Image: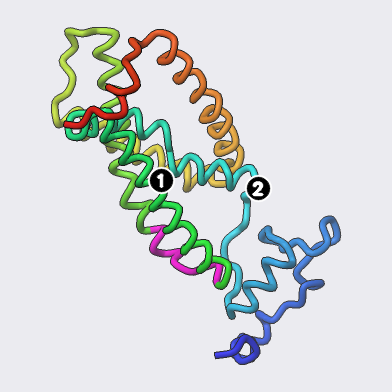
Amino acid sequence: MSATAMQDMTKPEERLSISEYGNDDKPGVAPKGGTAFDEQEMRRMGKVQELRRNFKFIGIVGFVTILQATWESTLLANSFGLVNGGTGGVIWCTIAVWLLMLCMIASMAEMASMCPTAGGWCCCLGWIAGIPSCGIQLAGVVQAMVLLVNPNADVGTLWQSTLLVFLFVLLTVGFNVFFAHHLPLAEGIVLFLHVFAFFAFLLTLWIMADHAPAVQVFTTFK
């Protein structure tokens, strides 16, 4: 179906021109956020904007960066790779996954360039499914921090982990429901912490950790 035919199917009250969709303060900006180009793209796909666009460029970069959680997730998941693959397995598998992910991202970018809403609900379901796994990881981090302070603490039981997971899920859902308009600011702050904390961890490990020969690091497999 052509774009013209899709526009003809749109209800008359939904056919707003770009000038009508703007406001006096910021010409071409929709009342729910976005630009005239965004409105044009929504019109091309025969859709009407329902949600408010709160994110700017920095907020979007922060959201994507936090969603990937590159070095944070690596620190938490390294133990499994080191046990099952060794240092060489972790390094070379990471490079292979990075290259394959580039192929997947390129295909998703191609779809998004044609239809920005393509696969939106699939991504949304993926984020929802990923929340419990993030809660489990955070629960493990909290329990590990407690053990660092008090090695004799009685932590690590399943019911404690479950309650911590529920706590993090409730905090996440509550923030997104009641403080959604603060999400861009939160994403920007966490992006700042993500970048600078990386160097803090890297320099600490680089200076204080024991150094192994390069041959051992890159060629040890288990």
Q: Is residue 151 left or right of residue 30?
A: left
The amino acid on which the numbered mark 1 sits, given as a three-letter code, is Trp
Residue 62: % across, % down: 56, 41
Residue 139 visible to the viewer: no
> Mark 2 sits on what residue?
57
Residue 27: % across, % down: 83, 62
Q: Quadrant of residue 119?
A: bottom left
Location of residue 49 with respect to 130 vertically, above or below: below
> Mark 1 sits on what residue?
98
Tag count in the figure?
Answer: 2
Which residue is at the front of the view, 114 or 165?
A: 114
Secondary structure under the numbered disc 1 in the rendered image: helix
Report the residue that reaches farthest toward the right: 24
Location of residue 142 with respect to 33 vertically, above or below: above
The amino acid on which the numbered mark 2 sits, given as a three-letter code, is Phe
Residue at image point 42% right, 58% down: 104
User: Residues in magenta?
Assistant: 115-124
User: Spatial distance from mark 1 to mark 2, Cα to Cα?
Assistant: 24 Å
Residue at image point 21% right, 34% down: 85
Residue 143 located within the stretch drawn in magenta: no
Which residue is at the front of the view, 20 or 199?
A: 199
Residue 106: % across, % down: 49, 59
Q: Quadrant of the C terminus?
A: top left
Mark 1 / mark 2, whichever is N-terminal: 2
Residue at image point 45% right, 19% down: 201
Location of residue 12 with respect to 163 vertically, above or below: below
Q: Quadrant of the N terminus?
A: bottom right
Which residue is at the front of the view, 178 or 122?
A: 122
